[in-house]
């Protein structure tokens, strides 16, 4: 039997602040003041301090002596470093799924992709929460894959990257709303490759979409730097 403790208060605070960073409600360079956050959320400064350490490990903030916590910047270097390893980890997840399962056993993946498509079809791409909902639906497919692979180390590693990758994904979706349809296409291709037990195509699809997304984010950063 597997017991799962409820999320700690510090983790809940970290998720709340992390989501605000992901959607740029807290922009790069913004100071996060412990006392202010504690007052707004009616929690202790100790819990906020622990939450900030969690966010630092997730590369969403930096903590400086005497200056405190500051939302970290997205730079070409950080984006490249992130995608270099994240694409490889996704390819590993895909390979492990095919090593353990094949054919009809993977029809559940198609079901998850259909759920994602339902979310996209129901969305007005101009709605303010469109990007957030697509990102969450996409990670729903990944969580399903975790259950198939049953590798807690790979799952934990990918989940630790989730806030940072969500942040870059949000940037791409906010600037290029046609990326929402591109996301649906990516997951359909992914599911087709999995059901057909085509490991080479699965890896190619992941790499192509990852590189495409990397370039979209880098383009946006260059445009913002020259503005």
Image: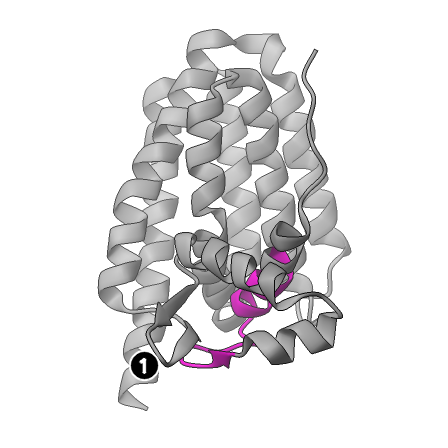
Residue reaching furthest bottom? 227
Q: Is residue 169 left or right of residue 133?
A: left
Q: Residue at x 30, y 59 (%)?
A: 79
Q: Position of residue 114 (x, y in %)?
A: 69, 35
Q: Residue at x 31, y 51 (%)?
A: 82
Q: Which residues are magenta?
A: 15-32
Dot 1: few (<14), some (14–19), or many (≥20) neighbours within 10 Å? few
Q: Is residue 25 left or right of residue 169?
A: right
Would you say residue 104 is visible in this rendering? yes
Task: Quarter of the image for the C terminus: give it.
Answer: bottom left
Q: Position of residue 223 (x, y in %)?
A: 32, 81
Report the number of numbered marks: 1
Q: Which residue is mark 1?
A: 223
Task: Quarter of the image for the N terminus: give it.
Answer: top right
Would you say residue 19 is visible in this rendering? no
Residue reaching furthest left? 77
Q: Residue at x 47, y 67 (%)?
A: 171
Q: Taking 95 as reference, is 117 above or below it?
A: below
Magenta span contains residue 58:
no
Q: Taking 54 as reference, is 226 above or below it?
A: below
Q: Taking 19 as reference, is 202 above or below it?
A: above
Q: Position of residue 222 (x, y in %)?
A: 28, 77
How is the structure coloured here? one colour
- The quarter of the picture where residue 201 lies is top left
Magenta span contains residue 20:
yes
Q: Residue at x 69, y 32 (%)?
A: 5
Q: Secondary structure at mark 1?
A: helix
As rendered, which of 41 and 153 lies closer to the eye? 41
Q: Position of residue 154 (x, y in %)?
A: 42, 27
As rendered, which of 104 and 92 lies closer to the eye? 92
């Amino acid at each position: 039997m597997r017991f799962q403790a409820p999320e700690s208060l510090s983790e809940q605070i970290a998720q709340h602040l992390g989501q605000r960073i992901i959607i740029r409600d807290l922009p790069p360079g913004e100071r996060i003041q412990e006392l202010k956050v504690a007052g707004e959320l009616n929690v202790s400064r100790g819990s906020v301090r622990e939450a900030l350490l969690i966010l630092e490990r997730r590369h969403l903030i930096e903590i400086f002596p005497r200056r405190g916590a500051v939302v970290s910047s997205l730079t070409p270097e950080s984006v490249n470093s992130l995608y270099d390893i994240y694409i490889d980890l996704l390819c590993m997840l895909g390979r492990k799924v095919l090593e353990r399962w094949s054919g009809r056993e993977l029809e559940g993946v198609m079901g998850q992709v259909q759920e994602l498509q339902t979310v996209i079809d129901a969305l007005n791409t101009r709605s303010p929460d469109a990007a957030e909902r697509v990102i969450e639906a996409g990670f729903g497919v990944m969580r399903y894959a975790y259950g198939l692979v049953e590798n807690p180390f790979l799952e934990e590693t990918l989940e630790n990257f989730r806030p940072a990758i969500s942040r870059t994904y949000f940037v791409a979706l906010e600037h290029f709303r046609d990326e929402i349809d591109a996301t649906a296409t990516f997951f359909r291709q992914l599911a087709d490759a999995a059901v057909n037990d085509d490991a080479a195509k699965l890896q190619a699809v992941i790499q192509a979409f990852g590189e495409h997304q990397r370039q979209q984010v880098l383009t946006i950063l260059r445009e913002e730097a020259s503005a």
